[in-house]
């Protein structure tokens, strides 16, 4: 190939890359987030202070971490309705267990217990989904209800007050770095990067996309689908558990009735982040952006004088807009290839 | 025997109680190119999927590289050096060309980490071997069907395979690409790789294969070295001796055409298509996969509106922008994918047969008149000789009977124009000839018939005029009686 | 004797050896299974708690609880027959309740006459139907015209309705409605509670739609294979619109009934109802997943679910565990259907194989 060819192919590739970038949900999302921020910021200058930005990031953490799990399940082609139930189940049980064995144990123990519990609950989901071929939606809807009942009946239904919480958890909630950034934000970024690497640079991670794109073909090129599905649900269960522990620590109390009603919020955030319900599409950065955007809508509209009563409505509208945009994009791709 | 790579002994396989493979025996020698020939639905694809581990088998013995496998998974099969080019390509639409080719290499090598760079290298090298230059970074869902087939081929030949199985690998390829594929096959053979080549096209079989294995209705019917195989006998083996079709000769044609399109176009799918169909005629449109023949059929039926062109029925201009308009103008369409688009497997045969005419069954209150419904269903069941009770579900029928149900559903609506898109795909030989019989009968009963097909034998016997489409345009048109197998096949695969 | 056993097995849907020789259709099989389960549970309860279980209070409360879930279940069943789901029905009903609550609070005072109140209640009904219609159109537009998956589309509108309700009420419940409305919730006719009669009315309407109109057949066929309905010239979009409008209007009327039953209108009533309605859809077999049930199966499934729930209540099982029962049943039934399908397929394949081998042996013998 001579030089001119190379150059022209470089130019065409560049324009194509730019086009692709514009077509991508992440780009659109960044633009919307920036646009919304500019609007809020121009009305209320407080918005652009580092303090507010740190606050938004902190408010995003739980949804970002749980969103990773929901997002990975969605790439593989399923909608997980048990995410927040697993989160609170693991966090609440782990806190109780830790209080029972050694209230002064280090924080890592709390996380480890929760991760094991979350992983096991995820495994149960995965078993139903892979062994009995139950649609993910039905399976996780049912297990979520069952997990909730089992927790309330056998583990406890009374919330753990701040005074009873393990000291390590309270310390965690008061740990700030970089002049006021909460430490759990760093944890979220660590998990995002870890998941990014797994999804992008491991065979299992590529398998998640393959499974979501064409399950039968994935089996034919040698993926063991059942094993792959189990790994997905165990990993997601662990993410939910970490998210749950962070939630419990940061709110300094463990309420077994908490979080459970937010499962659709997480799914909405992930869909907002460019994931497709039919599977095969999405990246962890989309999770972050979706979670950020939904947090800004829910928490910061009050800064520009919109009552918090409107948050659900505005969020609903933006959610519909995101879904519609996605539908148009899919239709356009289809038309292009048809 | 030590020099057999693959041995099948008495392999049996059923799906939901329907036996598709009956005591299959097969030996594949090292470096041998074996052709498996058979009609659609004869069981050849099932046979391949058993070797590749996609399906379990019910009975018999499977030996690969001298090792016995009581059951085999796809990864075991791949580890034994078996690579398959599936008929449906089995690609990932949401991944790039490079990933599609590279991912299975990573799996084969049992790697844990995915290396995008080595994927690209492998993909590039393997595409170079086929002599095609594709953009490695495009998503497979964005590339045309012919390129998809090339990606599927590239994925299978890049690895150190011992056996490469190709399930109808040329359906979307042009003649040049097909020749290139022959070269690759010959190179593979020379380096000791065995080939299983599934096809029913004579010229392909004789170009690359050492041995021909013919399967019919799930049974082996012939197995000869290619030099002892008489060319003319292939269709005899594939279809069975009892079936002999006379070439279709139209009775008197009407003066005026029943159905006519002029300058029909649909974006990039096809351009400037014009033809006429008279009463009593069967017009056939053929072409490679991706030539636009399927899109044309669907556009005529209003699935997507034509971007240009006119349509006339009985000389009157009509517009078909959607399916309901097509039905209003009495155009009927038999889809090529019977299971996905034609039949309701879990609905009763009765409901299947009235699906198109449901709105005509209403009484004054807007409720379904059960008597009329039962009568109509019974009438078409009898006329099409569907052998089952009306209450039985569609899935309890054989492929041929299912296709009759789909035909019956449309005939119940009294169509003027009938478009059949590959109507005998996956239908057993006997039903096939009966369906041909039905089509001829309908042609004689004043229905304009447009047959879309890629089965050359079917075309030659069941049409009086042939149009070949190539790259979205009409590249050739002739009276069927002036054509033979080779001349038509050449027209289909030629490059413009 | 043997043939009678075979016949019974066939009706129960057990031990069918050859699908082309099935005599009893799957619908009857499902309904017989449901009736049998109802009889068994009924029997257990009557034996265990003869006095409390058969008391008129218990039966009445069971009927009312059936109607609480039942009307939503009918709405959900419609969308499940189409192979989909409608998550927005409960929040739509709450929206209707909230709108009407605000209206009634505004127009009705202590001095409003009886007839005027009835007139206003009719206005409420009209509003409910209109809101239901609009809700159905929005869902259908998202699903049919924009091609958004049902789960997502209805999840989005669910959020939206919740948002609108929150704006109207500021998140607080509205309580205190005219006695005329409350009477509908608590009164009865010949001992049968009004809500149950209203439920039966809807069930009859549903039966006519599903079993007697061309639409019913189209809906079922659409649920089984929507590409095939498209290629059969059935207007898929129209089917979606009809289904979701019907479902949303049904749910909207339920909004009024919620007001009548609870004397309040809140944004988040009935959080658990969705799971139960999905269970009913699966249990009755109407969901396209199995694709066999009809309106009668829905009623039977509702009775069965209620029997189990009331039974556990009378046996003093904790409320946490009781809430879990529909979910546990849901997942068990889907798993069981899958396992049964697999075993049946395996058995059929074994039979086909045996037949083939026998034939091969016979031929071999002849050849020798």
Image: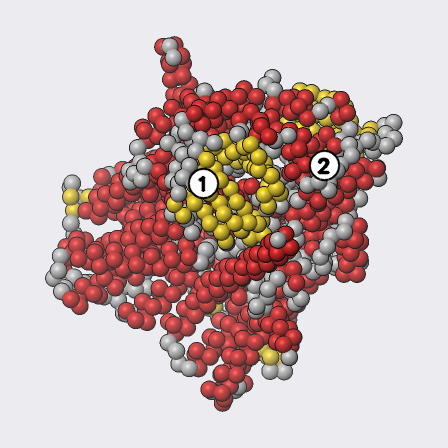
| Label 1 SS | strand
Mark identifier at residue B419? 2
Q: Chain of mark 1?
A: B
Give the Cα separation between the discs numbered 1 and 2: 43 Å
Above or below, B375 against B25 in this view is: below
**Is residue A30 rendered to the left or right of residue B27?**
left
Q: Position of residue C263 (x, y in %)?
A: 49, 71
Could you say which quadrant of the image residue C315 lies in?
Answer: bottom left
Residue under the point 71% across and 40% down: B241
- Which one is nearer the viewer's eye here, C286 or B220? B220
Residue under the image location 24 percent in, 39 percent down: A49
Q: Nearer the viewer, mark 1 or mark 2?
A: 1
Q: Does residue B379 appear in this view?
A: yes
Residue at image location 27% in from the left, 60% down from the top: A117
In the rendered view, would you say B13 is above or below B299?
A: below
The picture places residue A227, in percent across and down from the top left corner, at: 36, 50
In what element is the residue under mark 2?
strand
Neighbours of disc 2 within 10 Å: few (<14), some (14-19), many (20+):
many
Residue B210: which disc? Answer: none
List x then y, in percent, for residue A68. 32, 46
Reading the image, the residue beneath label 1 is: B6
Specify the farthest residue to the front. C368
């Amino acid at each position: 190939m001579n030089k001119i060819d190379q150059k022209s192919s470089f130019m065409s590739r560049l324009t194509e890359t730019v086009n692709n970038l514009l077509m991508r949900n992440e780009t659109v999302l960044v633009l919307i987030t920036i646009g919304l921020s500019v609007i809020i910021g121009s009305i209320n200058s407080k918005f652009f202070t580092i303090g507010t930005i740190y606050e938004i990031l902190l408010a995003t953490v739980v949804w970002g971490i749980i969103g990773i799990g929901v997002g990975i399940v969605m790439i593989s082609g399923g909608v997980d309705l048990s995410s927040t139930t697993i989160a609170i189940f693991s966090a609440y049980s782990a806190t109780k267990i830790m209080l029972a064995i050694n209230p002064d144990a280090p924080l890592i123990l709390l996380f480890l217990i929760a991760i094991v519990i979350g992983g096991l609950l995820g495994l149960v989901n995965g078993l139903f989904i892979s062994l009995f071929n139950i649609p993910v939606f039905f399976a996780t809807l049912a297990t979520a209800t069952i997990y909730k009942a089992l927790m309330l009946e056998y583990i406890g239904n009374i919330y753990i007050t701040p005074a009873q919480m393990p000291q390590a958890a309270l310390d965690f909630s008061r740990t700030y770095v970089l002049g006021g950034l909460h430490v759990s934000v760093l944890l979220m970024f660590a998990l995002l990067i870890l998941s990014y690497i797994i999804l992008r640079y491991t065979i299992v991670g590529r398998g998640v996309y393959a499974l979501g794109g064409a399950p039968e073909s994935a089996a034919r090129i040698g993926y063991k689908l059942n094993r792959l599905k189990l790994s997905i649900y165990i990993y997601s269960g662990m993410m939910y558990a970490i998210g749950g522990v962070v939630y419990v620590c940061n709110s300094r109390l463990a309420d077994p009735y908490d979080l459970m009603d937010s499962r659709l919020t997480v799914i909405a955030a992930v869909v907002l982040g460019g994931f497709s319900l039919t599977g095969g599409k999405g990246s962890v950065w989309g999770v972050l952006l979706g979670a950020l955007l939904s947090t800004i809508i829910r928490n910061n509209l009050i800064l520009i004088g919109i009552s918090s009563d409107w948050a659900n409505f505005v969020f609903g509208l933006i959610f519909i807009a995101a879904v519609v945009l996605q539908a148009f994009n899919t239709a356009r791709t289809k038309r292009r290839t048809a | 025997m030590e020099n057999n790579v693959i041995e099948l002994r008495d392999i049996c396989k059923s799906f939901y109680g329907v036996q598709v493979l009956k005591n299959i025996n097969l030996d594949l020698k090292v470096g041998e190119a074996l052709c498996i020939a058979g009609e659609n639905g004869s069981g050849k694809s099932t046979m391949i999927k058993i070797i590749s581990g996609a399906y379990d088998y019910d009975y018999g013995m499977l030996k690969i590289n001298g090792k016995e496998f009581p059951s085999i998974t796809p990864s075991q099969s791949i580890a034994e050096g078996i690579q398959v080019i599936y008929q449906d390509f089995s690609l990932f639409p949401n991944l790039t060309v490079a990933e599609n080719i590279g991912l299975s290499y990573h799996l084969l090598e049992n790697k844990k980490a995915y290396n995008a760079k080595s994927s690209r290298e492998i993909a590039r090298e393997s595409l170079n071997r086929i002599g095609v230059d594709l953009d490695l970074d495009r998503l497979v869902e964005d590339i045309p069907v012919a390129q998809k087939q090339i990606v599927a081929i590239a994925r299978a030949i890049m690895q150190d395979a011992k056996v490469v199985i190709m399930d109808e690998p040329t359906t979307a390829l042009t003649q040049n690409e097909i020749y290139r594929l022959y070269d690759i096959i010959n190179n593979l053979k020379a380096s000791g790789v065995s080939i299983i080549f599934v096809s029913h096209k004579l010229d392909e079989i004789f170009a690359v294969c050492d041995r021909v294995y013919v399967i019919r209705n799930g049974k082996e019917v012939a197995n000869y070295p290619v030099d002892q195989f008489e060319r003319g006998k292939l269709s005899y083996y594939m279809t069975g001796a009892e079936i002999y079709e006379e070439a279709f000769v139209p009775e008197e044609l009407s003066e005026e055409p029943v159905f006519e399109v002029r300058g029909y176009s649909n974006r990039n799918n096809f351009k400037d298509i014009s033809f006429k169909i008279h009463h009593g005629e069967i017009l056939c449109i053929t072409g490679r996969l991706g030539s636009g023949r399927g899109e044309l059929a669907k556009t005529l039926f209003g699935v997507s509106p034509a971007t240009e062109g006119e349509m006339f029925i009985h000389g009157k201009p009509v517009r078909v922008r959607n399916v309901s308009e097509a039905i209003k103008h009495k155009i009927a369409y038999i889809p090529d994918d019977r299971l996905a688009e034609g039949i309701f497997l879990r609905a009763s045969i009765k409901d299947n047969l009235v699906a198109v005419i449901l709105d005509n069954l209403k009484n004054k209150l807007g409720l379904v008149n059960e008597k009329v419904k039962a009568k109509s269903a019974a009438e078409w069941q009898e006329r099409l000789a569907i052998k089952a009770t009306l209450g039985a579900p569609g899935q309890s029928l054989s492929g041929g009977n299912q296709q009759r149900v789909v035909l019956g559903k449309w005939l119940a609506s009294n169509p003027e124009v009938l478009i059949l898109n590959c109507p005998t795909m996956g239908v057993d030989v006997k039903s096939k000839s009966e369906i041909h019989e039905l089509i001829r009968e309908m042609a004689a009963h004043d229905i304009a018939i447009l047959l879309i097909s890629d089965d050359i034998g079917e075309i030659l016997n069941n049409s009086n005029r042939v149009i070949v489409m190539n790259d979205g345009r009409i590249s050739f048109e002739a009276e069927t009686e002036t054509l033979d197998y080779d001349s038509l096949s050449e027209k289909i695969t030629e490059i413009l | 004797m043997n043939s009678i056993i075979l016949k019974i097995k066939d009706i129960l849907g057990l031990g069918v050896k050859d699908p082309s020789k099935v005599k009893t259709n799957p619908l009857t099989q499902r309904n017989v299974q449901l009736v049998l389960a109802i009889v068994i549970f009924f029997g257990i309860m009557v034996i265990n708690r003869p006095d409390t279980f058969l008391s008129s209070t218990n039966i009445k409360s069971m009927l009312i609880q059936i109607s609480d879930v039942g009307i939503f279940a009918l709405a959900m069943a419609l969308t499940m027959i189409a192979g989909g789901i409608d998550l927005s029905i409960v929040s739509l009903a709450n929206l209707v309740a909230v709108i009407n609550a605000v209206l009634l609070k505004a127009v009705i005072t202590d001095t409003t006459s009886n007839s005027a109140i009835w007139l206003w209640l009719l206005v409420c009904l009209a509003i409910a139907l209109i809101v239901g219609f609009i809700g159905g159109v929005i869902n259908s537009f998202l699903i049919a015209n924009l091609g958004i998956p049902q789960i997502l589309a209805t999840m989005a509108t669910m959020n939206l309705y919740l948002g609108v309700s929150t704006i109207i009420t500021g998140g607080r419940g509205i309580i205190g409605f005219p006695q005329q409305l409350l009477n509908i919730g608590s009164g009865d006719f010949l001992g049968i509670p009004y809500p149950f009669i209203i439920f039966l009315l809807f069930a009859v309407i549903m039966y006519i739609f599903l079993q007697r109109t061309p639409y019913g057949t189209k809906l079922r066929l659409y649920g089984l294979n929507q590409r095939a309905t498209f290629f059969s010239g059935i207007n898929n979009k129209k089917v979606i619109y009809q289904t979701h409008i019907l479902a949303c209007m049904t749910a909207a009327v339920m909004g009024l009934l919620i007001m009548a039953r609870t004397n309040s209108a809140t944004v988040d009533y009935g959080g658990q109802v969705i799971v139960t309605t999905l269970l009913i859809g699966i249990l009755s077999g109407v969901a396209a997943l199995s694709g066999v049930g009809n309106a009668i199966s829905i009623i039977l499934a509702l009775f069965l679910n209620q029997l189990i729930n009331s039974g556990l209540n009378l046996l003093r099982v904790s409320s946490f565990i009781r809430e879990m029962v529909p979910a546990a049943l849901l997942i068990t039934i889907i798993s069981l259907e899958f396992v049964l399908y697999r075993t049946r397929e395996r058995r059929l394949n074994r039979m086909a194989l045996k037949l083939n081998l026998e034939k091969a042996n016979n031929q071999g013998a002849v050849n020798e």
